[in-house]
Amino acid sequence: MLPLLLTITFILFHLHISAAARLCRWDDRAALTAFKNSFTNPNPFPTWDPAFDCCDWYGVKCNDTTSRVISLDIASHGSLTGPIPSSLANLTYLQNLCLHKIPNLVGQTPPSLTKIPNLRFRVISWTNISGPIPHFLAQIKNLAYLDLSFNRLSGTLPPSLPTLPYLFAIDLSRNQLTGPIPEAFGHFQKAAGFQALDLSHNKLFGPLPSSLTNVPFSSVDVCRNNLTGDTSVFFGKGKAASRIDISRNGFEFDLSKESFMESLDMLDISHNRIYGEIPKQITEAVYFQFLNVSYNRL
């Protein structure tokens, strides 16, 4: 009987230690509770029960060692109504913020989010937030991935974004952004190894800045805008892009003078004013998975 009691005691002791180690901090719990109470719905997160460790709440992830909240991922939540709560800034150890497919999320991004020093991945997509892309995003120095797609953002592209030292991907597609692409977008920090840019389905206009030739894109999508001129900044044998979509713009250049990289497996240049001959490098290529050159002057 004694060995059995010792075994049970040992198990209960370790369960107690494990549970204690997982308890999230009181200030993180308070910040999450304030976030929940900011919305008009009286109980938008039924599983956020104060009787349970907030590290086990829906959409919440804590660091296994420090028990600090490092991720908040809320998706497909139609009952959240109101602006983005400024109380999120009190989650000072947050690294990942994802608010996705929340149609009743409105208003502008609160400046208080700059107080989250460790934020690396920020996704606020498929919502109804509006206003300009905030210039203060450049103050979140650890930001590596920015997705603000499928919103109602307007205004111009902030030239301050390329100053972020670790930013490697931006998705600002399907908004109402206007103006030209800033020259600064060709000067992303080398430490970031910038790779992916999606500005599609906006109202951007004007020629592409020549500085973009400096960026080692792996993927670029500027389709369905009002951009003009040529797109040679994206092409060349020294580049490493695998996906380029410049369709449905006003680009006008001689395609026969362009050279293409072997890494390219998806190219859509349709619905432009591109002229010349289709290079043999394209017609004889075996690496393309998708190619569309329709509705041009070829």
Image: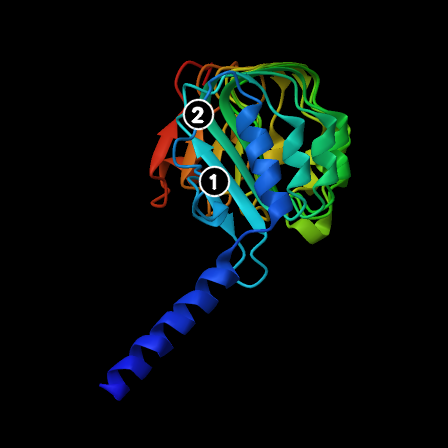
Q: Is residue 224 left or right of residue 140?
A: left
**Residue reaching furthest left?**
1
**Residue reaching furthest front?**
1
Estimate how packed mark 2 is, as few (under 14), some (14 to 19) or many (20 or more) residues with alpha carbons within 10 Å. Answer: some
Estimate how packed mark 1 is, as few (under 14), some (14 to 19) or many (20 or more) residues with alpha carbons within 10 Å. Answer: few
Determine which quarter of the picture holds residue 161. Answer: top right
State how far apart marks 1 and 2 are (Cα): 14 Å
Closer mark to the observer between disc 1 and disc 2? 1
Question: In the depicted view, which residue is nearer to us: 31 or 154?
Answer: 31
* Residue occupying the point 63% across, 34% down: 88
**Label 1: which residue?**
50
What amino acid is at disc 1?
A: Pro
- Split into 4 quadrants, where in the image is the C terminus? top left
What amino acid is at disc 2?
A: Pro
The tag earlier along the polypeptide, 1 or 2, is: 2
Q: How many marks?
A: 2
Q: Is residue 129 left or right of residue 114?
A: left
Residue 211 can be seen, yes or no = no
Give coordinates of residue 28: x percent, y percent: 61, 44
State the mark number for residue 44.
2
* Residue occupying the point 72% across, 41% down: 188
- Split into 4 quadrants, where in the image is the N terminus? bottom left
Q: Secondary structure at mark 2?
A: loop
Question: In the depicted view, which residue is nearer to us: 8 or 209?
Answer: 8
Instruction: Name the colour scheme.
Output: rainbow
Q: Against 150, is 45 above or below?
A: below
Q: Secondary structure at mark 1?
A: loop
Determine which quarter of the picture holds residue 3. Answer: bottom left
